[in-house]
Image (cartoon, rainbow, N blue to C red):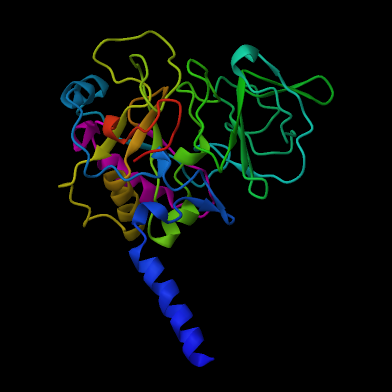
Amino acid sequence: MFDSVRKSLLGTLAVLILLPSAALPQQVINGCSVFPPNNIWNRRIDTLPLDPNSSTYVSTIGASTHFHPDVGNDINSFGIPYNLTKGKGKILPSFDYADESDPGPYPVTTKLLIEGGTWSTVNAGDRHVLMVDTKKQVLYELYATYPSGKKGIHAGSGAIFPLNSNALRPNGWTSADAAGLPVFPGLLNFDEVATGSVKHALRFTTRRTNGYIWPARHQAGPQTAGYPPMGQRFRLRANFNVSTYSPRMQVVLNCLKQYGMIVADNGSNWYMSGAPDRRWNNEELDQLKNLVGSDFEAVDERALMVNPDSGQSL
C-alpha cells in the first residue's frame, strides 16, 4: 500500500515538475482563475523583441514624464475598486452605446463600490463598476454608471467576460474600457503583491492613442500619429535597478519587467491602475513615482497571437 501511495506521489510530483510555467494557474481571485493561463494578460513578455516604434512611443508619451500609480488606501479617491458578487444578475441597464454593449443582466446595485466615490456623487470620472462572480467565473463591467429612476441603472457601456474563456469582444466593439478590453485583469491588487509576485499585465493610460492592435478591439478619441495604439504592451527595462525600493514595490517593479502593462484607455500619461485597499501604504506607493517614461520600452507581441479574435497566446 505504501509503495503504491509513494509511486502515486512521485508521479504527481514528476507531472508538476515537467509542466511548463505557462500551464500553471496565473492570476487567481477566491479560487477563480482570471482567464486561462495562456491568455495574453497572463503571458510573460520579458523576452519579447522591442517594437520597432518603441523609442517614438516613449518620446510622445513623455520620456521624462513621471510614472503614476493610480492606487492607494482611500477607497473613494484612488484607483478602481471591484466587487465580489454572488447570485443572478437582476438589472438590465440602459446604455449610451447599446449597440456595442452586452445587455446583461448584471448583478449591479447602488450598494456596490463604484470608482470615484459614492453613487450619489456626480463627477466627471469614469465611474466604473466591476463585479466578479468567482463561483460562476464571470466578470461584469460597467462604465459611466449612474442610478436611473427608482431601481434602474444607466451606463455608458457594459461588457461581460467569461473568465474561463479566451474570447475577445467583437472587433470594433468597446467595453467598459476604451480599448475594448476588460479592466479588472489589469488592476494591481494588494493581495497579489502580498504573496510576493504579480503574474499578469497591468493596465495604464496615455493622453492620446493611434488606432488599436491585438488584443485590443476598439479605438477612441483623436488618432494621433506617433502615439501608441490601444493594446500596445510596454515593460520596464530589464536593467532597471529595483534594489533601492521596498520589498512590496520590488514585487510591482518585477511584474512590470516580466508582464508589463497594456495601453487600455486615453487618460493621463503613464498612469497605472490598481484596486484601492486600506492596507496600501501611500508613501510606499509614492516610490513608484520615481520612474519616468524612458525607463520603459514597447514590445512586439505579434508572434504570440494564435487567432486575432482570441486572447490565447503561444
- What residue appears at the point 71 percent right and 32 percent down from the top-left corner? 106
Residue 96 included in the magenta stretch of the image: no
Q: In the picture shown, does residue 194 fall above or below 14? A: above
Instruction: Name the image quarter holding residue 203.
Output: top left
| 72 horizontally vs 247: left or right | right
Task: Tell me: residue 216, above or below residue 189.
Answer: above
Q: In the image, residue 42 lies at what x, y percent?
A: 40, 45
Q: Is residue 130 left or right of residue 8?
A: right
The stretch of residues the image draws in magenta is: 271-300
Picture quadrant where residue 63 is located: top left
| Image coords of residue 88 (percent x, y) | 77, 39
Say if 60 sits above or below 77 in the image.
Answer: above
Q: As drawn, which residue projects farthest toward the right?
A: 150
In the picture as drawn, the residue positioned furthest to the top comes out as 222
Q: Is residue 95 at least partly visible in the picture?
A: yes
Horizontal and vertical percent position of residue 97: 61, 13
Identity of the residue drawn at 44% across and 48% down: 37
Does 277 appear in magenta?
yes
Q: In the rendered view of the protein, which quadrant contains the C terminus?
A: top left
Give the camera-side residue of 99 and 170: 170
Q: Which residue of the protein is positioned furthest toward the bottom in this rendering?
A: 2
Q: Quadrant of the N terminus?
A: bottom right
Q: Residue placed at 66% from the left, 33% from the top? A: 118
Taking the image as shown, residue 235 lies to the left or right of residue 267, namely left
